[in-house]
Amino acid sequence: MRRGRLAGVAMVVAAGVLSGCTGSTHDTRTDSRERGYVGGGGHAGDAAPPGKGAVQPGEPADFRSTFALDVDTASYSYAQRMIRDGARPAPGTVRTEEFVNSFPQGYRRPKGDGFSVSADGARLGAGDWSLMRVGLATRKSDPDAPRRPAALTFVLDVSGSMGGPGRLDLVKDALRTAAGRLRASDSVSLVTFSRGAETVLPMTRLDDGGRDRLRAAVEELKAQSSTDLSAGMKEGYRQAAEHRRSGATNRVVLMSDALANMGETDADRILDHIARHRKEQGLSLFGVGVGRNYGDALMERLTNKGDGSTVYLSTRAEARKVFVDQLPRNITLRARDAKAQVVFDEDTVTDFRLLGYENRKVADDDFRDDTVDGGEVGPGHTVTALYAVKLEHGAKGRAATATVRWLDPDSRKPHEEQHEIAASELAGESLWKGEVSPYLRLSAVAAYFAEALRAGGDAASPGPEPSPAAAEAEPLPAAPSLAKLRSEADRLAEEPGLPSAARLAKNISQARGIS
């Protein structure tokens, strides 16, 4: 099959949706200039000299796949909320990588700062196609270990749309958790927005009664009227910049349903404001989404521009978990501007496709350009990239080399780690065999499920209209049905350390029953 006939969806069609992600779908017969990229290889910058498999000058761009790291999980959490409420999520809100990154991966952790790089794979059972998993992991941190203080500006949506269950009540519950978890050396300010913006708690150190003032301000929060998100972001970033603490981790935390309806509702203007403060002040944005009618696309764009990440809350348990686990990860950093590049060997690989990361693509030649934004990654994070890879029949030797590049959070010095993947690692067992890593199989189930939702479901349980990219895709063989995916998730739930597979199985089962 020619790659040009297969662009678009889908792990559900065994290849992944790639709407707009033309830099991640490749074929040796396609001129890279058609995708807006110029071939010719990268440059080493200040990092150590690239090892075997790294891009060399003159190497064809068609054999490279480059993206900024993404630790978001909001898409899967929002999908769970919609399915629980009896509806399938809109295909455009489903991001495959966020489904995959919501599950444990079992990667080894590095001993120091930075990343470990792992890879494995299995045959898809369709011709010479295989599934390859590239995994990146950072070292976990002791929650009680010394860290630099934090200066956090919470920008809180108190508009009328936040008045229903599962909105402002969850925000307040999360903030109560934060008030108990943050340290006396940290400082917090609260900015609210509805028809306008107001600072209800100036930047306050959480000692000498500061924690009590924070709690009191949280209890006073009430839903009001319209949603001037632009005013809230401007006032929040003004507060954060004005009270920026040297030697501290400075963050803006937006908590909203992201449904702007007055003021500057033009996302581009809000994005420009965020980008300017990120570059000039180093202020990153952490997004916390709530509400059934959630502005997923806007929140995703805001946090991507703010060099941050997004989570979604639908229950009090999730709110407490996020502010116990996720917030500390956004206070301490392991890496800035982290990017990954996978270089495939043209002698062993005839075609490949990255699943997801459409919004995080990076031009191949910008991999070692440290002025080009990557992603921020904190302690204990894992990032997974799944590729559908077609090998030459009987291929031997190296299939690909995965490299991650990042800047030290303090010195801004670049570092790299890489890992080679042999063709034999991709051409062994069939994916659904018990001998294959349960973590790889769980990632595959999550990805197939995401792509089924993006494509509108399978033949047995049709759902909403697929995205345009999904509608144009030509299925590859061996795409499992939702029934098969549910069965596999049930099996995985019996594996040690994978209780999250049981919830995934339930989500798949419920989605099958939604017409």
Image: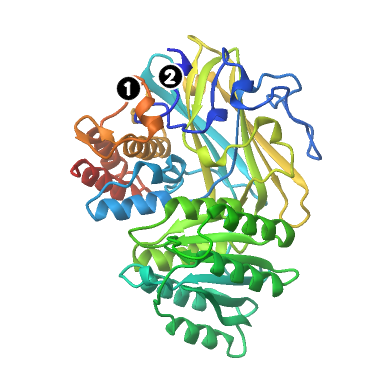
Report helix, strand or loop for mark 2: strand
Question: Label 2 near label 1: C-beta < 8 Å?
Answer: yes
Image spot of residue 141 (x, y percent): 59, 60
The mark that comes first in sequence, 1 or 2, is 2
Report helix, strand or loop for mark 1: loop
- Position of 442 relative to 313 (above/below): above
Image spot of residue 381 (x, y percent): 54, 51
Side (left or right) of 421 relative to 474: right
The amino acid type, in three-letter code, at marker 2 is: Trp
Image spot of residue 469 (x, y percent): 41, 30
Quadrant of residue 495 within the rendered picture: top left
Residue 306 has which mark? none
How far is disc 1 from disc 2 in space, using C-alphas? Answer: 10 Å
Q: How crowded is mark 1: few (under 14 residues within 10 Å), some or many (20 or more)?
A: some
Measuring 51% from the left and 11% from the top, which residue is drawn there?
392
Front residue of 166/200: it is 200
Image spot of residue 74 (x, y percent): 43, 53
- Position of 56 relative to 328 (above/below): above
Front residue of 365/336: it is 365
Measuring 58% from the left and 60% from the top, which residue is drawn there?
285
The amino acid type, in three-letter code, at marker 1 is: Ala
Query: Label 2, on which residue?
Result: 129
